[in-house]
Amino acid sequence: MRSRPGTRPLPARLRAPLRVVAVAGVLSLLAVLTGCSDDGADQRQPGAEVTSQEAEVLSQVLYADREQGGADFEVSAPYAEGAVLTMTGEIDFSRGIGRAQAVTSYGGDQPDETRTLFFTEADLWQGDVPGLAETLTGAGLPAATYVRRPITTTNAAGTSSLLDVLVQMVPRLGARTADDPRSFADYTWRGSQSINGELASTFQSGTGARIAVSAEEKLLVQYVTQLQDFDVTITLADHGEREITLPADDDTVDLTAHPEVAAALGL
C-alpha cells in the first residue's frame, strides 16, 4: 500500500465533518419512515432540508455506534485509474482498535497486493509483508510476522499515505459523546435506499459528504466522502461487541526502533 503522490493529508478537523455527516442521517429517517414529520412527508423530494427532529436524532448516530461496541466494515477507495484499495475487517469503537485485510488491485497483469492489518488510533501493524523474513534474517533480528509503526498524517514529502488516512477514518465513525443538533442545519435529505439488505435514509452535508442511516436500528451503515479526486466509501454492518487482540510484541518488529528494516521494505 504505497503512498499516492499528491494525496492530501487527513484534515486536522476531520472528526468534526465525519460526525456532522454521520449524525445528520437518522432524523430524516425517522421522519420519512415512521411519519414523525409533517403530513407532506410522503411527497418529500431529494434535496429537502433536514427537520429539527431529524437533526436531534442524527446528533446521536456516532455515539450510538460506539455504544453498540463495534461493527464489521468495508472500505473502498478507487484512488487511481484501475487501482482500488479495499479494506475488509472489524472495528471495536469502544477501544479504537481494528483489524482488516487490505487488498490493492491494480488491474491488468499487475498482481494484487495483500496485507493483514491491525490498528489503533496511534499505531499500524502490517502482516504478509513481502521480504520480511529475509530482511529480518539479514539484519540479525528474530523472526516476526508483523511490523509496527506510528500512523502518520504526512510524510517527509508533505503527502499522506492513503492507508494511514483510511485507518484513521474508520474509528472516527464512533464517538464518545453526542453532537449538537444545530451542527446539521445545512444538511439535506437525499432519499432512501437498501444497503446490505437494510433500508436506510441518505443525507448530504454542505461539503458533499454523504451518510446513510438504518431505518430500524438508527445506526450508521455507510459514509462516503471525497479525498482529492476520488470517493472513499465506508460501509458498516452487524453492529455489536467486538474483541480484537493486537499482535504480540515478540511477534512484531518496531520499525521506529529499526529504521533500516523500514527502509529495506519500503515502509
Image (cartoon, rainbow, N blue to C red):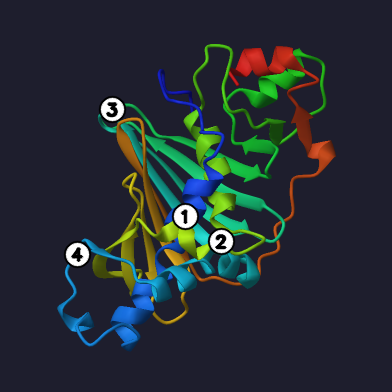
On screen, residue 34 versus residue 154, left or right, reads left
Q: Give x and y (percent) for residue 237.
A: 47, 67
Residue 235 in sight: no
CA–CA distance in space, label 4 to label 3: 42 Å
In what element is the residue under mark 3?
Answer: loop
For the residues bearing labels 3 and 2, Cβ distance under 8 angstroms: no
Circles 1 and 2: CB atoms closer than 8 Å = yes
* Circle number at residue 179: 2
| Distance in Å between CA atoms under marks 2 and 4 | 24 Å
Residue 130 placement (x, y as % from top left): 57, 26
Disc 3 residue type (three-letter): Asp
Name the secondary structure under disc 2.
Answer: loop
Label 3 belongs to which residue? 109
Q: Is residue 117 left or right of residue 146?
A: left
How many marks the image carries: the answer is 4
Tell me whether the residue at label 4 lies in contact with that at label 1, contact meaning CB atoms closer than 8 angstroms: no
Inter-mark Cα distance, 4 to 1:
19 Å
Query: What is the crowding at mark 1: few (fewer than 14 residues within 10 Å), some, or many (at least 20)?
Result: many
Q: Of discs 3 and 2, which sits in the foreground? A: 2
Task: Give the camera-side residue of 143 and 13.
Answer: 13
Q: For the residue marked with disc 4, what is the amino acid?
A: Pro
Residue behind mark 4? 46
Secondary element under disc 4, as helix, strand or loop, is loop
Residue 98, image x, y percentages: 63, 51
Residue depth check, mark 4 versus mark 3: number of the one nearer the observer: 4
* First along the sequence among labels 2 and 4: 4
Residue 219 as seen in the image, left or right of residue 245? left
Mark 4 and mark 1 lie on one chain; the one further toward the N terminus is 1
Residue that label 1 marks: 20
Q: Residue at x 78, y 38 (%)?
A: 251
